[in-house]
Every structure is written in C-alpha cells, then in structure tokens.
Image (cartoon, rainbow, N blue to C red):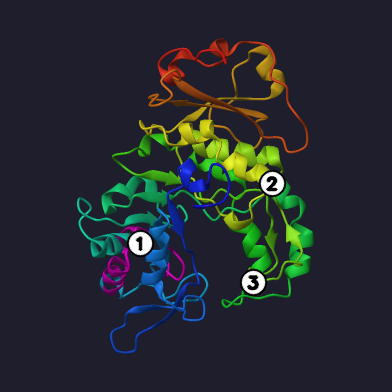
Amino acid sequence: MATRGSPTLREAGYTYLIIDDCWQGKRHPDTGAIEADASRFPSGMAATADYVHGRGLRFGLYSDIGNATCAGRPGALGHEETDAATYAAWGVDYLKVDFCYSAGEDPVTHYRTVSRALGDDSTRRIFLAACSWGRGAPWTWGPTVAADSWRTGPDLLPFWSATTKAAIADDFVAAEGTYVNADGKAEAGLKLSTTDAVLQAADRVAGLGRFAGPAVGWNDPDMVVGFDGMTLDDNAGGDARRWGGLTPDQAASHLALWAVAAAPLILGVDVADLPPDLQALMTNADLIAVSQDPGGVPGRVVWSASDAGWAAGRPPVAASGGADADVDVWVRPLTGGARGDMEYAVLAVNRDARRSTTLAGPTWARLLPVAATGVAAASG
C-alpha cells in the first residue's frame, strides 16, 4: 500500500490497513485480555500497529459482538471494556465489529455497549464500523450508538448480479456440498444464499443516502472485491478452484457505484499482488475525487429503465433500480473541492451481464428530472 505502484494506494488516498478475522489467539487466563495469534503475529499487535503507522497508514482490527467471531476466534461479549483498553494501548485506529454468534439479540444494545467501551464519541480516536449485516436497519440507529459506519446488508461475493450468482449455484454446491461448518450447516449453500452480489448490495444502499453524511456516518455495502473469485476453502492453496469473479468492466462499475454512493472504499483484494489494470482502476483520480468529495452527500438512483425506454425518453416504471432494469442512472451532488468545475457525478450502469447497452436519444438534461437534484443535470 505504501510502496507499490505509481501512485501507490496510500498516495491515492487509501488510509487504513485493516486486519480482518483470525488475528486473535486466546484470552489471557487471568486478565481475560485478548491476545494475538502468536504463530501469525509473533511480535504482537502493538508492534504490528507501529509498523503500519510507520508507513504512513492507520491500523484497523476486527472483532465481534458475540462469544466468538465468525471464524470461531474469541468474541467481545462480556469483554468490551477490556478489549477497548487493549485496542487503545495497541494504537488501533479502526475497529470492525461483526455480528456472528449474537444469539439473535438486539444489535442496538450490543453496539452501544461496544461504543461506550471505546469512549466518548467527541474524544474517541477509534473508528467504529458496525457490521450487523443490515439487521435492525442500522442506518436508523447507527448514529445513536456513535457508530461511524454501518453495514447495509450481508457479505459481498465477487458476482455481478443475483443472476450470475445463481448460474453457478448448482455446480458450486455440488462441489462443496460435503463440507459442513461448525454449526452443522452446509457451507456452500450458506455462502450463496446469505451473501450479496454487487448489484444486490448497490440496490440496498440506493435509497439510504439521506441517512448518511460527514456529521452522521456512512452506509457500508461491504468491500470492493476486484476481479478475483472465491476459493472453496478460505485457506486453500493457489491451485484451488475459483468461483465467481468480475470482468474488468464490472469491477470498474463496482468501484464507481461505491464512489457515487459515498460508500467506504475498502479493498477486499490481495493488494500485494494487484494486476496493473486493477491498480490503475483503484487509484483512478476522478473516481477517488468523487468518492472523497468533501461535501459527503451520497448519490441516489434518479432513473431506471430498459435501453428501449431510455432511447424513447419514457419515464421508468420505478426510480429505485431493481433486478429488471437494464440501466440505472445515479446522480451525486459534489461540492467541488479541488475539482471546482464539477457540480454532479452522473453514473449510468448497465445491469445486464450478458450484453452491452448503448444509451442514445434524449440528452442528460432531458432524462434527469429537475426534482432529482434541484437543477437540471448538465450534459456530459
């Protein structure tokens, strides 16, 4: 992140290095303090944080509100105060708190407990990312528990749409169907049925812009997944069969959707081995400028239609996107900042994974209603 590419990810504006699940070892038998997995982090997490800070980056960790993390490592339940003190001592800047093994309890209560343990929001230095998978509509309660961001839905897998995900479902389940997780459930079916594809995640966040902003917090539809598919086993070797994956055009659309939605750009890819074209995409100055616009106003879908309807200038059936729309048009107001010549970011998304779409006919100003942004959007 700090040294590879020109610009590097750090130079492009990526601020945090976040370690997700499986960094934990055990809890100290006397104090209950969380300890790092010594085989993976033999120098400990404080030294790891110092190393990351020394490269000009901020440092993030993962926890869970339940008794255990999603991978079965120690969770935070009953240890919130101890963990908060430990993370502060280590120099942690960002904390993702997951929702596994929560016993179906009220997420508001749990995340408020974690937030209070981290300290008063006016002085707290740790960014709190509440990951309740959209349970309980966290965009409505996230600010009340002083969360800085909240997940709007389940985990994201590298599929463009529900249709492309469903197309491999039978083969995927057949290949992995013999594997049963710790809860006695078939992992393959769970991965596909309890996760989102890119468009599913984008549809969830499309109507939530009014709940987010710099003084409130951020809608988080999950990570930017890049080109890669997933392996049958998270710990599988390089020769494991891969499933899913995005085309370069879909990956570009994924990043652009997150930028226009004012969603956090968290790269769920191997940043040590980014292909040059993916590195160029993820450091694209225009996309980063839209994503990090200082006004922080999220965009929204203002037009949804088939390409035929677009060409004829017909109004959409619904203005909120959806699985049956061929084209979605998003608009995000911009304050300008360093890009003072820009007033709006306009993004047209082809939802169809099988064919290209040409948008011909009415101009942008005719297509986008005045009510969408307050003024007619300019062409281009």
Asked whether residue 214 is in view, the answer is: yes
Q: Amino acid at mark 2?
A: Leu
Q: In this rendering, which labeled residue sits more in front, label 1 or label 3?
A: 3
Q: Residues within 10 Å of mark 2 (few under 14, many from 20)?
A: many
Q: Is 5 on the left or on the right of 128, as rendered?
A: right
The residue at which mark 2 appears reads as: 246
Mark 1: secondary structure? loop
Q: Residue at x 58, y 54 (%)?
A: 271
Range of the magenta residues?
A: 82-110
In the image, residue 230 above or below residue 152: below
Query: Looking at the picture, how far across and down is residue 357, in whole percent?
Result: 73, 26
Label annotation for residue 235: 3
Is tag 1's residue or tag 2's residue first in the polypeptide sequence?
Answer: 1
Per the model, the C-alpha gap separating discs 1 and 3 is: 32 Å
Q: Amino acid at mark 3?
A: Asn
Query: Looking at the picture, how far across and down is residue 116, in whole percent?
Result: 24, 61
